[in-house]
Image (spheres, rainbow, N blue to C red):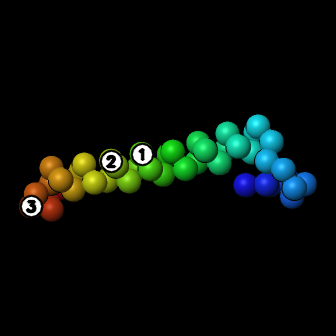
Amino acid sequence: ADVDKNGTIDYVEFITATMHRHRLQTEENLIKAFQYFDKDNDG
């Protein structure tokens, strides 16, 4: 996530990319957990 395209990933770019990825993984886990407990798919 070399946002400024200077050939390196600085600290802010690294943290931003890592946080975004972590958030997506967390969201996927929440969806999986919800689906696991919602056996009849009625929400």
For badge 3, the amino acid type reads Asp
Give the left or right position of residue 33, taking residue 13 as reference. left
Q: Residue 14: where, in percent of width, then height?
A: 70, 43
Residue 2 pos. (x, y %) = 79, 54
For marks 3 and 1, give the CA distance: 23 Å
Q: Are marks 2 and 1 in contact (CB under 8 Å)?
A: yes
> Residue 24 placed where, x, y %?
48, 52
- Sequence-earlier tag: 3 or 1: 1
Q: Name the side, left or right, on which 9 lies relative to 21.
A: right
Which residue is identified by label 1?
A: 26
Q: Is residue 25 above or below residue 41?
A: above
Q: Are marks 2 and 3 in contact (CB under 8 Å)?
A: no
Instruction: Describe the element under mark 1 as helix, strand or loop.
Output: helix
Neighbourhood count class around disc 1 (C-alpha, 10 Å): few under 14, some 14–19, many 20 upward: few
Q: Which residue was labeled with disc 3?
A: 40
- Give the residue at mark 2: 30
Examine the rendered structure and indicate whether residue 5 appears above or below residue 17: below
